[in-house]
Amino acid sequence: MPIRHRLRPYQAEIGRAVLASVLNKSGYTFSVMISRQGGKNELSAQLEVLLLTMFMNIGGNAVKASPTFKPQTINSILRLKERLDDAGYGGVWASEMGYAVRLGKARQIFFSADSSSHVVGATAHILLELDESQDIPKEKYDKEFRPMGAATNVTTVHYGTAWDDSTLLEEIKQTGLELERKDGVRRHFEYDWQVVARYNPDYLRYVEGERERLGEDHPLFQSQYCLLPLSGGGGFLGPSQRAQLQGDHHRRSSPRDKGVYVAGIDLAGEAEEGRDAHLRAIKPRQDSTVVTIGELERPGPEAIANEPVIRIVEHYWWTGQPHPTIYARLVDLLKNVWHCRRVIVDATGVGAGVAGFLEKALGPAVVTPFLFTAASKSKLGFDLLAAVNSGRLKMYQGDGSPEFQEFWLEVNRARSFYRPNQTINFYVDPSQGHDDFVMSLALLVQGSDYMPRRASGRLRKGY
């Protein structure tokens, strides 16, 4: 194997344990948690090459499942083929059926663990691998994948990172730790970003940049790099995060010379009784339209994340007013008063009409419609947390205004809920009020990409 693909000590430690279980037919189930981009896929591919080599004259199937076929399963297939070529098997291995690779009599078969896939009936003779196990439904694993190794007492490996304490991977981890306490056989292997960084200075710089950009308390940093499971939800912003959000600048009613301004607009949900229940669950009906104006500042040379600072400078708030009655004022404020370079507007449901109107009035280069879905709202929440945690988002000083009071009321009441597949929902419980100001704030953060980041030379890809 070329030296550029030599396994690091922590990868080799896992590989030896898995190989011993396969050769001794121990049938152990391992859980492997390695910090994101820390090398689990490289370890998996090299294990597959080794086992295909060892079983090429004996025969048998190894099976690997990923949460999705495209891109995860496809990436695993491509990596295995590359490593087979590196090992000198170019022209020897064969691709079969688009989802299997054969070397001699042995096969490595790849499946999707998506809920819509049908994989019942395959047998794993050599090894069963579950990639990103935290994203695989428990029912899918128990019904379709686990039985694949029942007749062969197959060794099983679950790879991934942490998410919340209800995932398949966390369950396998806890079961393994309990068995370890009984018989002393190590079944759980865990290496956070600090372990990986000991062997890769570029990775150290990359993760330090992510910590600066996201904040150490960000759910993604805690789960993917520190490998700490999340508790399932709670307050969206904690006391320290709310303290970080408070700025020392004054509210403004007009722009500064040469200031760069963006806006986030959350629209009132007028006449939305006909919306379906699924859409209401993603973005409940709101009673107010809120516009949040932010001023962008380029980061200083000492900033690691290279993201612009966003200073909230003004709020506009209309309650109970139909959209057409505020069209003219919206355009005047955004175009003639603040000269906004980027406007992110809620285009969900009836908001599509307002978004279309603003696009025509201000131009598509300025207005970006935002459609709320479970996935897009999750990204909205993660990006908002990153901006708060990194100190890039600041609210104006208290001025006693209704807008200031409502903003902090909603921020204090906002809750979060961590879903499977590493997504988040954030909201204010309808029994406690509305979340118009919080959603407008989150949309504002999306507008900060108007000011591009400086090139940082961050690591893009690793193993």
Image: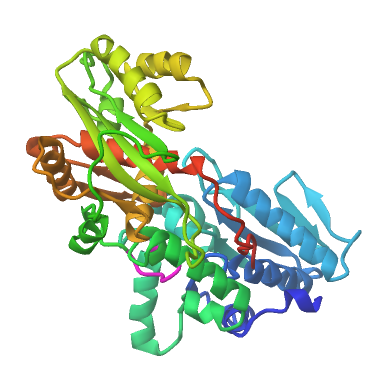
Q: Residue at x 63, y 60 (%)?
A: 460
**Which segment did they paint magenta?**
223-229
Indicate left or right for 424 with 460 as reference. Answer: left
Residue 243 spot, x, y in % from top left: 21, 60
x then y, percent, for residue 281: 26, 32
For this orientation, the residue located farthest to the bottom is: 184
Q: Quadrant of residue 441?
A: top left
Residue 400, placed above or below residue 157: above
Quadrant position of the N terminus in the picture: bottom right
**In front: 195, or 441?**
441
Taken as a whole, is the magenta stretch helix, strand or loop? loop
- Residue situated in front as seen by the camera: 150 or 235: 235
The image shows residue 390 at horizontal and vertical percentages of 37, 60
Give the left or right position of residue 35, taking residue 432 as reference.
right
Looking at the image, the residue that sits furthest to the top is 324
Relative to the observer, which residue lies in front, 120 or 63?
A: 63
Residue 227 in view in this figure: yes
Instruction: Report whether residue 162 is seen.
Output: no
**Residue positioned 46% across, 75% down in the render:** 192
